[in-house]
Image (cartoon, rainbow, N blue to C red):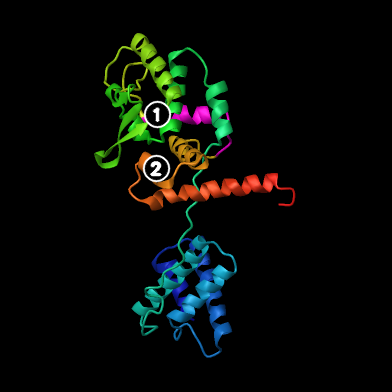
Amino acid sequence: MMIDQFLSYLRYERNRSPLTVRWYEESLRDFETYIRGVDDYLSLSTVDADVIRGWVERMMDEGKKPATVNRGLSAVKTFYRFALSRKLVEKDPAHGIIGPKKSKPLPQYVREGDMNRLLDEYLQGDEYNKVRARTIIIVFYETGIRLAELIGLNDEDVDFDSMQLKVTGKRDKQRIVPFGAEMAEALQQYMALRDTEVERQEPGLFLSNKGRRVSREMVRNLVKQSLSEVTTLKKRSPHVLRHSFATAMLNNGAGLESVKKLLGHESLETTEIYTHTTFEQLKRVYNEAHPRA
């Protein structure tokens, strides 16, 4: 009865779609069935918070995803707010109940072998656009900087004597990122070609053919096209190259604190997600290599 009143409210007072109403009904009927299984004397008007938590736990035990569990809990919470407003219940038993946290997806990254093929085989050529593309990919992959940080680079931020890059990150915080001989050579070749091919209009390090600082969209498209040559990842963005940098560093022995500083993370927790990525890679290697895995 209470559920039917609530569904009528959704249909005729809130003008919710039939699909939305059906989703609410499925969640609430499931909850009602669970209540009956707990105790014959229980009803929607007499349950307490522990019963609702038990229903949430049962859904989790059944292997339902956190998003599905939270959607069901949201339906029950909305139902009880309605019931309380219509004086169908004396108190809201769902108030304050928190659903399971959604698991964060592991960051996608390009494997080292694929990055080597991209830089050593595909991104070759003497034209300005190709040299610029290869240099941008190298800078992303060898420093792990963000898209906005790359766009904001100026010539004076590159110190070839110390082999260091001065990066201005979020909230204008600056950090120093070292780079190697390959990146130094790529930058020098690019800058020399840029100064002969492009009439500078702005002080940026990476310039469009018209001499303006490269745009976000231009760099995103450049990275997407480049990565499409070697990977089928759904995401082929500058941030994937940042993930690839962090993963490669950890896979080759870098400490977590060092990677945190290079990436410009405020908290070590943000960097720790890459340890899960490297463990997933370790499991794949194990499963592929061990004869009885």
Residue 158 lies in the magenta-colored region: no
Disc 2: CA contacts within 10 A as few (<14), some (14-19) or many (>=20): few
Tell me which residue sits at (36%, 16%) in the image.
191
Residue 143: percent from left, percent from top? 41, 33
- Which residue is at the far right? 291
Tell me which residue sits at (43%, 46%) in the image.
256
Nearer-N-terminus badge (1/2): 1
Q: Amino acid at mark 1?
A: Phe
Whether residue 32 is visible to the viewer of this picture, yes or no, is yes
Out of 278 and 126, give the one closest to the viewer: 278
Residue 223 lies in the magenta-colored region: yes
Instruction: Give the SS element for disc 1.
Output: loop
Residue 36 vs residue 293: left or right? left
Q: Which mark is residue 258?
A: 2
- Which residue is at the far top? 196
Residue 8: percent from left, percent from top? 45, 72
Residue 219: percent from left, percent from top? 41, 28
Q: Amino acid at mark 2?
A: Ser
Q: Which residues are magenta?
A: 216-233
Q: Which residue is mark 1?
A: 179
Out of 135 and 104, give the one closest to the viewer: 135
Tell me which residue sits at (52%, 75%) in the image.
55
